[in-house]
Image (cartoon, rainbow, N blue to C red):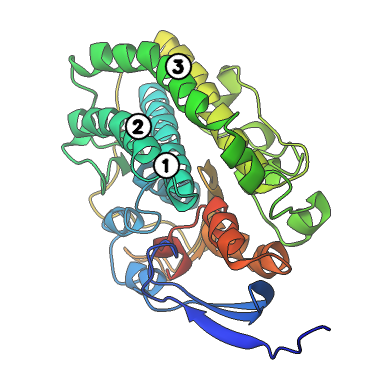
Amino acid sequence: MAIRTEPVTVNLGPQHPSTHGVFRLRVTFDGEVVLDVEPVFGYLHRGTEKLAEERTYVQVVTLTDRLDYVSAMTNNLAYVRAVEKLAGIEVPERAKYLRVISSELQRIASHLIATGFLLQELGAFATPLMYCFRERERILELFEMLCGARITVSYMRPGGVLQDAPEDFWPALDELVKAMPQYIEELEGLITSNEIVLARTKDVGVLTAEKAINASVTGPMLRATGVQWDLRKADPHEVYDRVEFDVPIGAIGDTYDRYLVRVQEMRQSLRIIEQCVKQIPKGDIRSRTAYFIRPPVGDAYGAVESPKGELGFYLVSDGGIAPYRCKIRSPSFINLTVLRDLLAGWKMADLIIIFGSTDIVLGEVDR
């Protein structure tokens, strides 16, 4: 005889180690099975878009560091590209290459965090996460050489970058690029064919290509569904049209595909960095701009392929020294819109894994 049960609504978070920040999930369960999910944002809200309207165009760079706080370089790049479009600022060739090198290093660092914490949520306590932290640390040391900071870097500037790479940066980068493939292989040896990982991630939390496109999902979440869309190919910026790289895609869009796409993207980032190091010319690293940038009246949208998807800044100028309006298209926020579809029908233990595979950062959700 079937036992009649009543649905129970449980609050997961906002303070919970598996919610990737101050994020609340209001989950309705039938036993352990998820019936419905309501994401609740706003606990971290910093008002970044409004703060940007009270800062000069250069001062806003420091605000962008604190959006996706594990991908500050790509946050910087998306913003300064919007300013450059708005003000008609040209960027020297050397600066473009430095931007791409630092952005691809940031992509690897971000994907290492995504992979390490996914495995932590699967119950593989400490070892895979520490492997990922170990390699990320080497990238943060390179950032420290570039700009003196590791996390909130503020390295990009409208018209170029803060400063040129020091001489000891290049041998250290070369050493990382040569060593990293071995470490990625080591990480995959722990994960990719692990029977527990396969049982917990294959065919779990499937997102179809149709739903992903309809919800404007981008980044590894979209590419895991088999859709080969990457702004670095579709709308090349900086020097991405001068380097060869592949866009990894998945098969069915499950949790396993999302993991695998990120691992493959790390390898492609290394390819891009190698080519940029060979091609980078000598020259200026920043164009001459006024101390207070005053773009003409108008608007502009600048976007990049951040580690989590399309990150864009829409700026409106009234001719002053600060943006009249700033609106951020953050991939973490938009990718969360499919969370209900991903979680319904799965169990509590699966919820943590599926949610972890979306790789969100609350800093750009509650912007």
Under circle 1, the secondary element is: helix
- For disc 3, the marked residue is 181
Residue at the image position 58 percent from the left and 27 percent from the top: 264
Under circle 3, the secondary element is: helix
Under circle 2, the secondary element is: helix
203 is higher (above) or lower (below) than 134: below
Of residues 279 and 19, the one nearer the viewer is 19
Label 2 CA crowd tier, 10 Å (few <14, some 14–19, many 20+): some
Q: Amino acid at mark 3?
A: Pro
Q: Earlier in the sequence, mark 3 or mark 1?
A: 1
In the rendered image, residue 23, in percent from the top left (x then y), is placed at: 44, 72
Q: Earlier in the sequence, mark 2 or mark 3?
A: 2
Q: Earlier in the sequence, mark 1 or mark 2?
A: 1
Among the 4 quarters of the image, the one containing residue 153: top left
In the rendered image, residue 144, in percent from the top left (x then y), is placed at: 19, 33
How far apart are the two marked residues, 1 and 2, measured between alpha carbons? Answer: 8 Å
* Residue 331 visible, this orientation: yes
- For disc 2, the marked residue is 131
Q: Are marks 1 and 2 in contact (CB under 8 Å)?
A: yes
Q: Quadrant of the C terminus?
A: bottom left
Comparing labels 3 and 1, the label whose residue is closer to the camera: 1
Residue at the image position 22 percent from the left and 50 percent from the top: 291
How far apart are the two marked residues, 2 and 3, measured between alpha carbons? Answer: 13 Å
Q: Amino acid at mark 2?
A: Tyr
Residue at the image position 34 percent from the left and 65 percent from the top: 322
Among the 4 quarters of the image, the one containing residue 33: bottom right
- For disc 1, the marked residue is 116
Q: In this figure, what is the number of numbered marks?
A: 3
Label 1 CA crowd tier, 10 Å (few <14, some 14–19, many 20+): many
Among the 4 quarters of the image, the one containing residue 68: bottom left
Comparing labels 2 and 3, the label whose residue is closer to the camera: 2
311 is higher (above) or lower (below) than 93: below
